[in-house]
Structure formats: C-alpha cells, structure tokens
C-alpha cells in the first residue's frame, strides 16, 4: 500500500506488488523500476547498484537527464527504384542520467564497493 492506501501494482503486468520480493513473481520485472527519484529536487539521494557480485553505494546528485527515441526503418523498392513500402524494424528509447557522487559526511566515505565473494 502507498501513503494513499492504494495497492501498488507491477507496471508491466498489473499484479499486486509483493514487498518481500525484489521482482514481480509473474513477469520478473524488477521492483527497482518502480522507484521514484524526485528530479526536481536537487537533494542528494543514496544510489545502490549491483552487478556481477559487486555492489556500489554512493550518495549522489542528479545533474542531467535526457530521454530520446530512435526508430530504424527499412524500405522495399521496385526493380525501377520506386519506394514501395516501409517497415519499422526497431524502436528504442534511450535514457541517460548524469549523476555525481558527493561526500557522505555521515558515513565518512565518498562511495563503497562491496564484493559478494569477500
Ligand atoms: Zn509483473
């Protein structure tokens, strides 16, 4: 439930969110996708990323964000070179975020790296 008493649901399949899990048990969408960062507020926030057993944690500020769309199209031509038809072969949305880490005075660090294998 959110602060308005509404049931939170998976944005992909609509199943109720199970707060004890990190991803939707039905469509495997990561619940991290549902996180909301208020980008109008330039207050630093904690960011935790995990890849290949390494977890990176830092206090960061958002500098810039951009969202762009690209479409790739293929055309079919007649033997005389007239364009007969077109087809969209792919659509992508590119999301780019620029962040910078700020000193975490409370913890006395700039960032931490943790290795699961340690
Ligand atoms: Zn789902």
Image: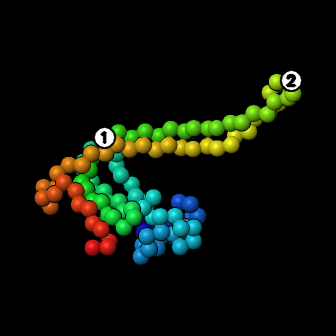
Q: Can you give x and y, in whole percent of width and height, for residue 24 in the image?
A: 51, 69
Q: Relative to the observer, which residue lies in front, 89 or 36?
A: 89
Mark 1 residue crowding within 10 angstroms, few (<14) / some (14–19) / many (20+): few
Q: Quadrant of the C terminus?
A: bottom left
Q: Can you give x and y, in whole percent of width and height, for residue 68 in the image?
A: 50, 38
Q: Quadrant of the N terminus?
A: bottom left
In this rendering, the count of numbered labels is 2
Q: Residue at horizontal 87%, vertical 27%?
A: 79
Q: Relative to the observer, which residue lies in front, 74 or 107?
A: 74
Residue assigned mark 2: 80
Q: Residue at horizontal 39%, vertical 54%?
A: 36
Kindly report the distance in space between the C-alpha atoms of the residues bearing marks 1 and 2. 52 Å
SS at circle 2 = loop
Q: Residue at horizontal 16%, vertical 57%?
A: 109
59 sits to left or right of 92? left
The quadrant holding residue 19 is bottom left
Rendering quadrant holding ligand 1: bottom right
Query: How is the structure coloured here?
Result: rainbow
73 sits to left or right of 8? right
Q: Residue furthest right?
A: 79
Q: Can you give x and y, in whole percent of width and height, for residue 104 in the image?
A: 17, 55
Residue assigned mark 1: 63
| 66 in relation to 29, above or below | above
Q: Can you give x and y, in whole percent of width and height, for residue 35 in the image?
A: 40, 58
Circles 1 and 2, Cβ within 8 Å, touching? The answer is no
SS at circle 1 = strand
Q: Residue at horizontal 57%, vertical 44%?
A: 92
**Picture disc at residue 50:** none
Query: Is the CB–ligand 1 distance for label 1 below 8 Å?
Result: no
20 sits to left or right of 115? right
21 sits to left or right of 82? left
Mark 2 residue crowding within 10 angstroms, few (<14) / some (14–19) / many (20+): few
């Amino acid at each position: 439930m959110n602060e308005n008493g509404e049931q939170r649901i998976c944005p992909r399949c609509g199943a109720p969110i199970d707060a004890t899990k990190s991803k939707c048990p039905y469509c495997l969408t990561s619940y991290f996708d549902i996180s909301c960062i208020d980008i109008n507020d330039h207050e630093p926030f904690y960011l935790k990323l995990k890849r290949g057993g390494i977890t990176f944690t830092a206090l960061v500020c958002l500098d810039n964000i951009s969202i762009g769309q690209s479409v790739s199209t293929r055309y079919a031509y007649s033997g005389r070179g007239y364009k007969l038809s077109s087809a969209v072969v792919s659509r992508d949305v590119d999301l780019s975020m620029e962040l910078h880490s700020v000193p975490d005075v409370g913890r006395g660090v700039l960032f931490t790296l943790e290795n699961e294998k340690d």
